Image (tube, helix red, strand yellow):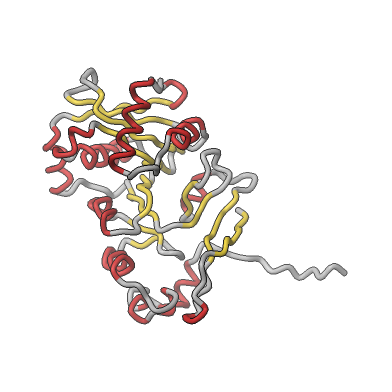
Amino acid sequence: MKLVFSEAEADPDRYVYPYVVWAFPEEGETPADLFEAGFLPSSPDLSIFYLARQLRVPLAPWRPTSENRRVRRKVGDLRCELVPRARFEITPERRSAWLAFAEARFGPGIMPAARLDRLLAGRVITHVLVFRDAGDHGPECGVALLHLERPRLAFYYYAFYDLASVGRSLGMAMMVRAVEWARDSGLAHLHLGTCYSPKALYKTQFEGIEFFNGHRWSDNLAELRHLLDIRPETHRLESPEYLAFLEGGLETAALVSPFRVPIREDHGS
């Protein structure tokens, strides 16, 4: 991959000079390679990715917790079916319901119609996971838009469901069911998006969940909560409180980092 660094707002008084890290896939690389390195898709055509504090569930060792089972029981018999995007019809009724859901749950203007249409037309959505109540022939109660690359990963991108079902934890039950489906399908990981606020901690209800901390995948939830709760005076890796979470400190962080920059010896002679 090629990396490009887009400058963000700096704080020279604290010697903080941040950059947003963008990745551009190169020949022979697949989206799974960039997910593995901590990047998420930034464009529907998968031409640009961005480095982020994202979450993933390692599926081989995963087993449902008592809380996962409680959530599943709360909604009853919830089935799911994987449908290729090309075979899934986006009816006017579905599109309208999804836009209403986005307005209510994500906030005004976060998912306008044009953005939803670009997303659905792009390469990033390969499949739709359709959820039904009471068996395979029950009514459709929700969908999740996926990027699937077997056998390495699925990305649980956006979920839409009946707003009237919020009280029965349908959204969380769909995510639990998706983790079950991904494990049973033989996938290595299910990616669940980012975690930058306490509101996103609901995604961490899965045993063994990991987050990308900038140089490696970590399963230390105390480290994640520290990142959410504490705003450091300077860069994280210059914060003694944060470095306490990193066994081996900065040297180990550098050793395990997936990023390498080759320095050319050729000076044009």
In the visual, does 196 lie left or right of 134?
right
Q: Residue furthest front?
A: 108
Q: How many marks?
A: 0
Q: Which residue is more in the foreground, 14 or 261?
A: 14
Reply above or below: 45 against 239. Answer: above
Give how far across and how far down residue 84 sits, in percent.
43, 26
Q: Quadrant of residue 175?
A: top left
Q: Nearer the viewer, residue 7 or 36?
A: 7
Q: Does residue 173 appear in this view?
A: yes
Quadrant of the rendered image containing residue 246:
bottom left
Q: Residue furthest top?
A: 137
Asked whether the viewer can see residue 207, the reply is no
Q: Where is residue 229 drawn, in percent x and y?
A: 28, 68
Where does the C terminus fall, quadrant-wise? Answer: bottom right
Please give the name of the residue rendered at 27% of the width and 50% of the height, measured from the top-left corner: 203
Picture quadrant of residue 179: top left
Vertical placement of residue 243 versus 92, above or below = below
Residue 76, image x, y percentages = 13, 31
Q: Residue at x 42, y 43 (%)?
A: 153
Q: Is residue 68 above or below residue 219?
A: above
Name the residue rendered at 50%, 47% in the picture. Answer: 42
Give the answer, above or below, for where 218 lies relative to 96.
below
Apparent side of residue 116 relative to residue 228 in the rendered image (left or right): right
**Left or right of residue 83: residue 124:** right
What's the residue at 21%, 20% (across, down)?
A: 138
Residue 22 position within the rendered picture, expressed as x and y whole percent measured from the top left? 55, 55
